[in-house]
Image (cartoon, helix red, strand yellow):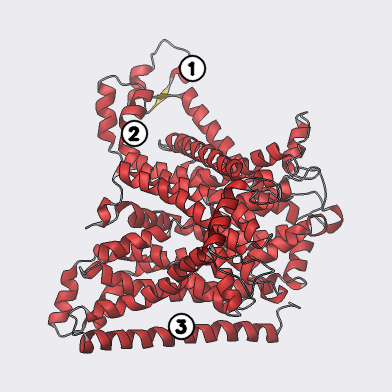
Amino acid sequence: MKSLTPAIVGSSLGQVGSTLLFLVAGVILVELIVYFLSSRVLKARNALVHMLLAPAIIGLGLLVVYPIAWEVVLAFSNMSLRHFKDPTFSFGQALSNFSLIFTAPVLKQVYFFPVFLRTILWTVIQVVFHVTLGLGLALLLNRRLLLKGIYKVLLVIPWAIPQVISCLTWRGEYHYEYGFVNIMLRTVGLPAIQWKSSALWNFVAMNITNIWLGVPFMMVICLGALQSISKEYYEAAKIDGATGWRRLRSISLPLMAPILTPAVILGVIWTFNNFNVPYFINENNLETSDILVTALFRAAFEYNRYGFSAAFAIVIFLILFVFSAFYVRFTGALKSVRG
Amino acid sequence: MEQKTVLRRDRSLPVRLLTARIEGESIWFRLMVNLILIAACVIALYPALRILSVSLRPNDRLLSTSLAVIPPDASLQNYKSVLFEKDFPLWIWNSLLITITTSLVGLALSATSAYAFSRWRFHGRSGFLLFLLATQMIPAAMMMVPLYIIAARLGLINSYRGLVLSYSVSSIPFSIWIMKGYYDTIPASLEEAAMIDGASRMYTLYRIVLPLAAPALAVVFLFNFMNAWNDFLLARIMLQRPAMLTWPLGLQSLQQLFQTQWGAYAASSLLIAIPVGALFLVTSKWLVSGLTLGSVKGD
């Protein structure tokens, strides 16, 4: 306990406590002011609604909307470590920031389009493996089994371990000499692999790690969806002589679709935005293993090109936005919101 | 029942076993199912068991090529050193302090706003709900650049203030969706009855609706807790001073000294992963149902 001294405890308690007091006082003050303004000055009928929503709106405004607006402004600047205090903002600078993304390396050597393609490849590989393996395990589990409870608990473990721990542990286990992956390869007589320094194998390593991490979530979702299907459909199909494959294709999958589609979309967005796995597994900072979000992080916090990174972030956001818009357009999702 | 139709009297025992069926599936098929599941369990579990194995290695045998789960010369040396000599208790204290505070603040803010979304139809309601969903698609890495610059300009780097504010707010959109979904299932007639008896709106919210929504409040608290507890990215850019690190940053600093601190790293990881993992396993049913309640069913 040598490091947890009373002085340090006191200072952290003081900081967090004062912030909490500030927040509570702020929220009460805002609610009172909004209620008074809304009911007495504007004579609004929904004064209570305004009061209840005000703190959340102000919070989101200050910490989500304002930073995004700032990011757009930042994209018009040449801010970097050298110009941190005195950035210049101009339209020409924005043009140069955005054109630099596509015409010059976004990091030291790697250009935008290879990173973009790698991100797509990574997302496709991950979602395909997560869904097929998750669905496969769910189909195996969806029957009466002696050890079903134990299987379910053990299979969910990769999801239950905090992600940072899993990633750091896998990173250690890709060690050439002492990691278990190479030790196992050697025991079965295969050559050991340079997981950390070879561009191809590092990409494979991050894929293996994230497949291990991501399958349990899909399995749980698929199992839930399978169990919600009424047994009567299968009995009817059996009487008609449908085979197992036919039952899967014509009953299970269509009836799982309403639950599976949003889960797959969430999976795509999460994988596309996954920071921990590509960042931690890539111990030697290989630019060939970066996906868009890790490249963005490096551009901002290792090369300190803030103006450029802001523009880069906007481009990444637009890509995701186009994808989501297509999804909403074609599947009619979010219909339920307009209730 | 079905076995009767399959088993014939004139067959010997092995043949009968081979052709026996359970719920319409042959024994061989069921054996295969169990074997595949066992293999999958081993794959899921082995990397986690490796953490245990490394954490039990004595310091002079840290680097070994053995694959045994329990090393022959197991010792608790690493646990002792992590708990009493290293910064581990400090990281846990920092993380707990920040995480519990922000989860409570986020919960309070979202529980009250979600009530407004559930009980009133007002101008801009659906637009705001859509906006909340849209914020969930913003990559965390994208927010880092402006948050860092703003925090740096306000002098919030190496302070918990920025981190607490940011965590409290970042979980609000998701929490509002879950709370709103749950409030929608509570009949409004309960509140109307209370209000006829002269209770105010706020009184009914605190005395009638919130106690009924306790399961949803627990789910939201848990979500907020897990998000803040496991966050690496924001803490990484906001905190640099060693005395202020949260556990993900602390573990990363240990892992970077792979050759000498692998055992300490593994012991700390296990000490964190076991309570958090157990909490997750116990509550995962609610977490998943909360997820589907909020994101799939919608209104």
Please give the residue where the numbered disc 2 appears in the rendered image: A252
Say whether residue B163 is visible.
yes
Q: Residue at x 33, y 84 (%)?
A: A31
Q: Are marks 1 and 2 on the same chain?
A: no
Front disc: 1 or 3:
3
Pointer 2 local density, CA inside 10 Å: few below 14, some 14–19, many at least 20: many
Say whether residue B229 is visible.
no
Left or right of residue A42: residue A172: right
Distance (Cα) linking label 1 and label 3 = 75 Å
Q: Are marks 3 and 2 on the same chain?
A: yes
Left or right of residue A242: residue B261: right
Q: Dividing the image into 4 quarters, which one contains the N terminus of chain B?
A: top left
Chain under callout 1 = B
Please give the residue where the numbered disc 3 appears in the rendered image: A23
Count the marks: how many? 3
Q: Is residue A275 above or below residue A41?
A: above
Q: Quadrant of residue B230?
A: bottom right
Chain under callout 2 = A
Give the residue type at disc 2: Ser
Secondary structure category for the residue under label 2: helix
**Where is residue B93 drawn, in percent x and y?**
62, 75
Secondary structure category for the residue under label 1: helix
Distance (Cα) linking label 3 and label 2 = 49 Å
- Considering every residue shown, the one lying at the far front of the view is A92
Is tag 3's residue or tag 2's residue first in the polypeptide sequence?
A: 3
Badge number at residue B13: 1
**Where is residue B290 drawn, in percent x and y?**
37, 58
Distance (Cα) linking label 1 and label 2 = 36 Å
Chain under callout 3 = A
